[in-house]
Image (tube, rainbow, N blue to C red):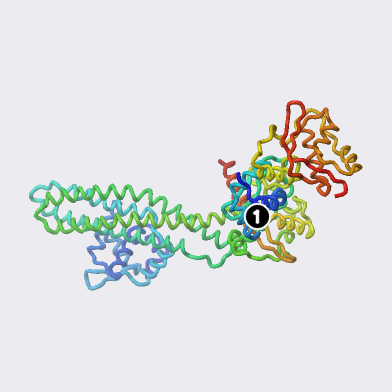
Amino acid sequence: MKSSGGMQSFFSFMTKHHHFIEDMFRLGLKSEWIISESELYNLMRSHEKDPEYNKKFIMERLIEFGVLSEFQGDSYEVQPQFSNFLKWLLRERKMYDHGYLVSSIEKMQRSQNSIEDNHNPKPDKRQLSKITIRDDLKQIIDAMNDLSLFVKTNRDSIILATKTVSDDDKYESKLTRYLEVKRLYDEYVEPSKKMVQQPFADTCDSIIRTLEETEIIFVEDEYIANLANIIRTKMISLRQLVATAHHDMWNDLTIALKELSTFVELHRGALLGQKIILQKGAKGLNEIIEKDLRIVSFNPRNLFTDLGLEVYLSNLADAEYTIPEFQIPETNDNPDQPIQTHLIETDLIASESIDDLLQYIISENSTNSLEQCFIAAIEIAEKHRNKTSLSNNKSLYKIEDVSLNFNSIKWEAEV
Amino acid sequence: MMIEKELTKISKEIFSSMRAGKHYSASDGELYFLIEKYESELSEIFSAVGFELIINTLGFAYLDGHSDNLVNKKTIQKEAAFYFVFVQWLLEDGKNPSQCIKEQHIYSLNTLPHLSTGSNMDIMKAVEITNDTDLNSMLKGLSKRGFINLKSDSFNLLAPSLRYIDLCYKIVSLERGEEE
């Protein structure tokens, strides 16, 4: 860069014409940094919507700033210092956002419109129309090449990013990678997928129809026919590329995102759990424990005891087994007073042995229900396991209309 | 249901401990594989005495408590606090807890983070774990119930620990639900 322009002037110029500069850079990439004068002017033409756009002025400034130098009379060379700087700049960005993709599609549409505008030339303008159409067809090919480059670059960059392993295994590195993958997904894949696929497919279909009409109108022009064939062939592969590239990117990113988000969510969950404890105390966890973490741990009563299981197993082994006539409720909601088992225990300890504990309790508590007697028998049996044993013989117990078929429990004080 | 001697033996052997919250996994050897083998029969038996047998596809079995009075929430609160701090510590060290379970990573009791920083101590204090004795007592409980394999100065996580890890995910989805 020559000092005459000054840094401020240089950056001001670059800011104003950055779209053109980037297009020129891509053109240079494809042509070993040698760009013909006509190519440069064509490029400017696509940016000359601004009425103040002055091609001559731009060329002079590019040379003055040392961006371009004349090469063999009719061409220009992009200076290595500048191309290297831009390479670095664009490599930093790595990706082409959907604006690039859309601008390529719009370029294809603009050229298509121009072709259609030349479909009905006056006889004396027919040759001029053919030349314009040839140029427009080339513009379509260029736009398709650009689109292909953007899509391939994005696909490769994203797949590389998703497969890149963090520098270390630390949480911060994983979190950084997660944020980067998520950014790529949010900024490139999702919007590009939405914006490119349908508009691109519609544009392709529309261009194919225009090409067919053009070939019929200018049937004598082999050059147009050849260009149209090139476009058709390229379009098939480009459509395939766009579809598969987005599928590949989406696939890789969603897999990476899922893997990393699992990691991040777990960390978040652990912190949230701690926050609940700090803010609401240990009881703050009760709601989620009740819902999702019902780990049993309790003092057994009634049906939930080992004896309850033993009786059930014993009954299972018995082919004659029938379902008991009544169900023992998990909680005792009988309004009657429960049997005072400690009083029975005192009597039992004093006695030597009782063959049928339940029958004994029934006889001693005749005003209580069978259900209450049963619960009392089980409670005593659980409490004095070394003094009780479950026999294999079943007995039928009955109080009023309620009956129960149950293995008898033997009490032996000296056991 | 025809009852086999082997099934009767397993039922009696595992019922007391499962009722007290024991989780069986591959680390319990043949017993766990027998639970898997007799899943439907055991489910029926335990259901008859008031429990639901759950065999998690991640490789562990336990009894589910239907009603509140079967669940000791205080114990679970302590253990949840232990796992919240431990999971954060593992993740920040670049470890995947699920992978640690699978690979049976061993952790020294001396290096645990629970009572080493002020913020962790505040969390543990909220669940009444204030010193090494309390912490060891809680770890013994976890070991007894099959969540960890505790040795004299170290332990490793067992498959049932995934229940507490899953709790972290559930808290996130609960919070997300509240936000929505």
Q: Is A8 on the left or on the right of A79, as rendered?
A: right
Q: Quadrant of residue A96?
A: bottom left
Picture layout, residue A413 above or below residue B158: above
- Residue A170 in view, yes or no: yes
Residue B38 x %, y %? 60, 51
The residue furthest right is A350
Task: Give the percent coordinates (x, y) of residue A325.
Answer: 69, 32
- Tally the numbered discs: 1
Q: Residue at x 64, y 59 (%)?
A: B158
Give the percent coordinates (x, y) of residue A14.
38, 61
Decide which of A279, A378 is in the foreground and name it. A378
Chain letter behind tag 1: B
Looking at the rendered image, the quarter that the N terminus of chain B falls into is: top right
Under mark 1, the amino acid is Tyr
The residue drawn where x is 68% and y is 45% is A313
Q: What secondary structure is marked by label 1?
A: strand
Q: Quadrant of the C terminus of chain B?
A: top right
Q: Nearer the viewer, residue A182 or A298?
A: A298
Q: Residue A281, can we see it?
A: no
Left or right of B84: which side holds A250?
A: left
Q: Is residue A88 above or below residue A100?
A: below
Q: Is residue A284 left or right of residue A2?
A: right
Q: Is residue B39 left or right of residue A247?
A: right
Point 73% across, 26% down: residue? A401
- In the image shown, does B99 or B3 lie closer to the viewer? B3
Residue corresponding to mark 1: B24
Residue A126 spot, x, y in % from top left = 10, 51
Graded by Cα atoms within 10 Å as few (under 14), some (14 to 19) or many (20 or more), the crowding at tag 1 reads many
